[in-house]
Amino acid sequence: MIAFKKVDDSRVSISQLMQPSHSNFGGKIHGGYILNLMDQIAFACASKHSKTYCVTASVDTVDFLSPIEIGELVTMKASVNFVGNTSMVVGIRVEAENIQTGDIKHCNSSYFTMVAKDENGNSIKVPGLILNDKNEVKRFLKALKRMETKKQRQLEFDSEDFSHIDYLPILQDYKVKIDLPDNY
C-alpha cells in the first residue's frame, strides 16, 4: 500500500443530464436521486484513494441550496478531504448547468465518511493524504472541526447526567410548547 497520496490522485468528477424520470412530483429533480449519485461518486473517490471496496459510514451536512431542473447538466466533483486510520471524508460539490444559457449554479454540498474494507468485510488502513494547497489544508481542518463538534454534541447529550431541565430556558425562544408530565 502507498503510504501517502495526493488529493488530486483521487479526485472524481461525473456529469449527467437530468431527465424527467429523475424528477419529483414538483417537477424538480428528486433529492433522493441526487443523494444516490452523491453516494456513488463518494464510493468511487474513496475506492480510488484506498484501492479497495468502501462503504458509506455517515453523511454529514447535506445542504440543498438550489433546485435542479429537468434538462440541466449536473456535474459532481468529489475529493478526499480527510483521512483517518480506516476512514476517509469525501467532500462533494454539485453544480447544475443550463446547457442552453451556460448558467451554472451551486446546488448541493455534502461530506460522506467512507470506510475501506477488505474481502472479508474488515476495516483496513488507508493511505495518508498529501495536502498541496491552502484549500486542501482548509478542507482537512474543516473535517477535523466537524468531527470535533459532532463528538462534543454526542458527549453533551448522551451523557449519563444529561438533564433536559437544564435546557428548557433555551427553548423559550423557539416555536415549541413543553407539556411534560410532572414526574418527567
Image (tube, rainbow, N blue to C red):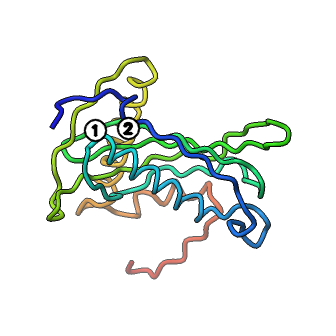
Q: Are marks 2 and 1 in contact (CB under 8 Å)?
A: yes
Query: Viewer-proximal residue, 31 or 21?
Result: 21
Q: Quadrant of the C terminus?
A: bottom left
What amino acid is found at the position of numbered circle 2 in the picture? Val
Q: Residues within 10 Å of mark 1 (few under 14, many from 20)?
A: many
Where disc 1 sits, the SS reads strand
Residue 115, position in %: x, y?
27, 53
Query: Viewer-proximal residue, 84 or 132?
Result: 132
Q: Quadrant of the N terminus?
A: top left
Where disc 2 sits, the SS reads strand
Residue 51, position in %: x, y?
26, 45
Which residue has dot 1 on it? 83
Residue extending furthest toward the right: 101
What amino acid is found at the position of numbered circle 1 in the picture? Val
Q: Quadrant of residue 94?
A: top right
Which residue has dot 2 on it? 80
Residue extending furthest toward the top: 133
